[in-house]
Amino acid sequence: MPSFVRGLTVVALAIMLAACATHVAQEKATRFDQGVAAYDAGDFAQAYAIWRKLAEEDDLAAMRNTATLLRQGKGVAQDERAAFKLYEEAAEKGLVTAMANVAEMYMEGEGVDRDPKLAAVWYARAAVAGLSIAQVRLADMYEQGNGVDKDHKKAVALLERAARNGYEPAQQRLSDMGIALAPEGEAAQSPNDGGPSGSADAAYSPPRSVSPAPVEQQRRPEPGDPFTQDALASMSADDANVMQQGLVAYRAGNKPAAFDAWHREAAKGVAEAQTRVALLYARGEGTKEDAIEAYRWLRLAAAQGNPGAWVELPLVAAQLSPAERAMGESLVRMPNGAQNKSP
């Protein structure tokens, strides 16, 4: 066979293989989203079945979500040991959030014998990879001498790294310790050391087109707050009318009706509705309490620059374990049939 013909054959084969790989990836993504849709509909058993199958095919995100359902007993009998094994497999294969969850379970003795030293090892792996919550957890261990030798300087260095990532709990910890975040490349200094003063940038900085006051200076949003003129101006007349109906229902004590009204608008992409729905999920008002769903809707609202979402998001995020926050991130999309979702 002439060399140029062989060359064309090789190229054609490479194109076919690439197309096949792309098709497989798209097919897996579609199935993962079907799991998301099932989870959204409250069909945790179906979500578990879909993600479990993908986990068996080495999909790391599906491993993490399957492990979380096993750990929480959602859609499947609770099995902490099986959850630990799945987290560990995903962590060994490089999923950073799973590394932090393995550490968390070692620390709590959940699904595995308690072992602070191994917890520190896994938190360190996740911290090196840049996961802020792992950096803070490891800082706590250095501060307390738990699983590692006590080392205040290492604790501060880890908190500083997390603060630079925009992680509000780390920023708050440094502030409580009287330590100002130093410019990049310099050590953190106490205000009494003659170093730079001031605090780190607020967590989850909004787009440049949005300029709310610093998070710590803003009042936390309440579901019963009146709508601002800016919020109403961003909606159609019909959307504003439904939002007002939800507000009337909430103030009258009919919180399920408020949830239904706002959820319909949230699914259409109305940022103010997404924030109100998140607040109801966070409080368990009008629907079951669900911090993952609260995080998910706040992320969607914050992406549109909603000021209330920017205030509430870091507070909700700080309550989530690494796996829960990762699941929330995997749900940050509009599911099919979201408009028909029931509480």
Image (cartoon, helix red, strand yellow):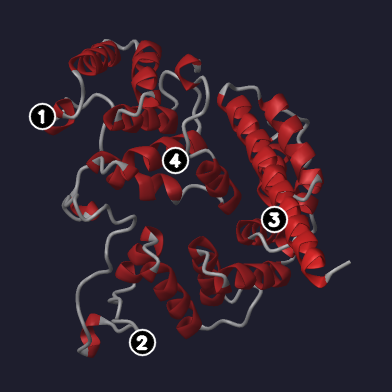
**Residue at 74% across, 51% down:** 16
3D distance between C-alphas at marks 1 and 4: 25 Å
**Residue at 55% across, 76% down:** 142
On the image, numbered disc 3 is attached to which residue? 105
Residue situated in front as seen by the camera: 236 or 104: 236
Tag in front: 4 or 3: 4
Secondary structure found at label 4: helix
Q: Is residue 90 left or right of residue 311?
A: right
List x then y, in percent, for residue 286.
42, 18
3D distance between C-alphas at marks 4 and 3: 22 Å
Query: Above or below — where is 191 with respect to 135?
Result: below
Q: Amino acid at mark 4?
A: Tyr
Q: Residue furthest left?
A: 229
Secondary structure found at label 1: helix
List x then y, in percent, for residue 285.
41, 22
Sequence-first tag of 4 and 3? 3
Q: Amino acid at mark 2?
A: Gly
Would you call the spot at circle 4 few (<14 residues within 10 Å), some (14-19), or many (20 or more)? many
3D distance between C-alphas at marks 3 and 2: 34 Å
**Residue at 72% across, 26% down:** 45
3D distance between C-alphas at marks 1 and 2: 44 Å
Sequence-first tag of 1 and 3? 3
Secondary structure found at label 2: loop
Residue 185, which numbered label?
2
